[in-house]
Image: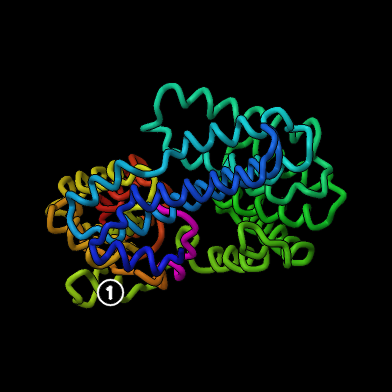
Amino acid sequence: MGKSVILHACQRGGNLSFSRMRQFFLFSFFLLSWLLPCSANSPALANGIRQEYKGNVELWTLSLQAATTAEAQAKIWGERPDASAYAQKMWAAIKGSLDQDWTLEQGGWLLKLVCSMPAETMRAEVKPFRAEVIKSIVDSVVKTHVRSAKLSPMCMGLLAIGDSNALKLLEKIEKENPDRKVQGVAALAVAILLEDLSDDPGTMKRRLTLIRKAIIESADVEIDGVTVAKLAEDQLYVIRYLSKGRVAPDLEGTDVTGAKLKLSDFSGKVIVLLFWNTAANDCERILEIHRNMVKKMAGKPFVLLGVSNDSVGSLRALEGEELVTWRNFCDVNNSLAMQYRILGRPLIFVLDKERKIQYVGNPGTFAELTADALILDPR
């Protein structure tokens, strides 16, 4: 069943609810599992878990985008596929085989999944599980797989961890792995992690050297359907146009009313530019954080602007119910997000009164503190 067929059925308000779509998908998955039996620890089982999660998230997202009232959206929000449940399924499928190369791709996917789960709202019992997964997979790479030729997907999983230990391991892989393609992927991951470490000239020069190595050695390697060449090109664009101190690229589009909206129209104000959508993990908390920010900054030289790829109807419903209290660029085709090389949502850019980038990262306290400091800056 194609996405367009499912979305059309949702928009008609017919009988094909998200729950029924999920039941249909699960039936298909379990039928396939019955036809292709697999052991408790096998590539087939692990692939099946990934496909089931991907399919359920796609169906859930389509259903959410088709909802035209805040009540319907609130109900669907509560039906989001449970990432922690799928993480536990995958962990059960691979943890007994971490010394085998086939778990590297699945383990990389699992790292990205557990690292995408918001720590602030994570259930107490999930936190030790998350820590166990990260430690066990990292230990298995260190002990068994540093020199494996199948390590490229795992490099992206280590990138998702994003801490100093992950950086050190990626640097080790980049230097010691005998496969030049793996070296190139690790080099790209190191370059991306260094972005958050420092913006001094020495670090910038090192990042450029690593990106060049990634292009030379691994241009045609695909990570989640995207080539290293494209990822490296995006990183070069980020360095040139989206680094701290650069004037942020102008954005021009329309809001939910069809009125024109342009980023440069807000010069002289501190701008918090929020890339978000209702499919993002912990969306309700993200909306609450930014409603509070808008309220706190009222009357100050400040503006919060959203960029969302949700449907216009969905955004109108959220704004109508005052769950969203700021103007949003409608970016259904992701053209504006592409200008900012957005890989995941939510993501915040804090811009000073001259539209220079002063912060890039996750929503939360640090973004608000940066905005506060810029508002008080007399320049």
Q: Is residue 103 visible?
A: yes
Residue 312: give x, y in percent of width and height: 25, 67
Looking at the image, which residue is at 38% across and 32% down? 120
For the C terminus, the quadrant is bottom left
Residue name at image x 49 percent, y 58 percent: 343
What's drawn in magenta, residue-wise?
A: 337-347
Q: Main secondary structure of the magenta part?
A: loop
Q: Nearer the viewer, residue 332 or 31?
A: 31
Determine whether the residue tagged by mark 1 lies in a helix, strand or loop: strand
> Is 162 drawn above or below residue 11 in the view shown?
above
334 displayed left or right of 32: left
Give the residue at x 80% y 40%: 146
- Amino acid carrying label 1: it is Lys
User: In which quarter of the view is residue 43 placed?
Assistant: top right
Foreground residue among 299 and 74: 74
The front one of 352 and 91 is 91
Q: Residue at x 56, y 27 (%)?
A: 131
Please check the rendered image and state whether residue 378 is part of the magenta-colored stretch, yes or no: no
User: Disc 1 marks which residue?
Assistant: 262
Expressed as whole percent of the image width and height from the top left, the position of residue 33 reads: 60, 44
Residue 346 in the magenta stretch? The answer is yes
Residue 283's x, y, as percent?
Answer: 32, 46
Q: Can residue 379 be spotted in the picture?
A: no
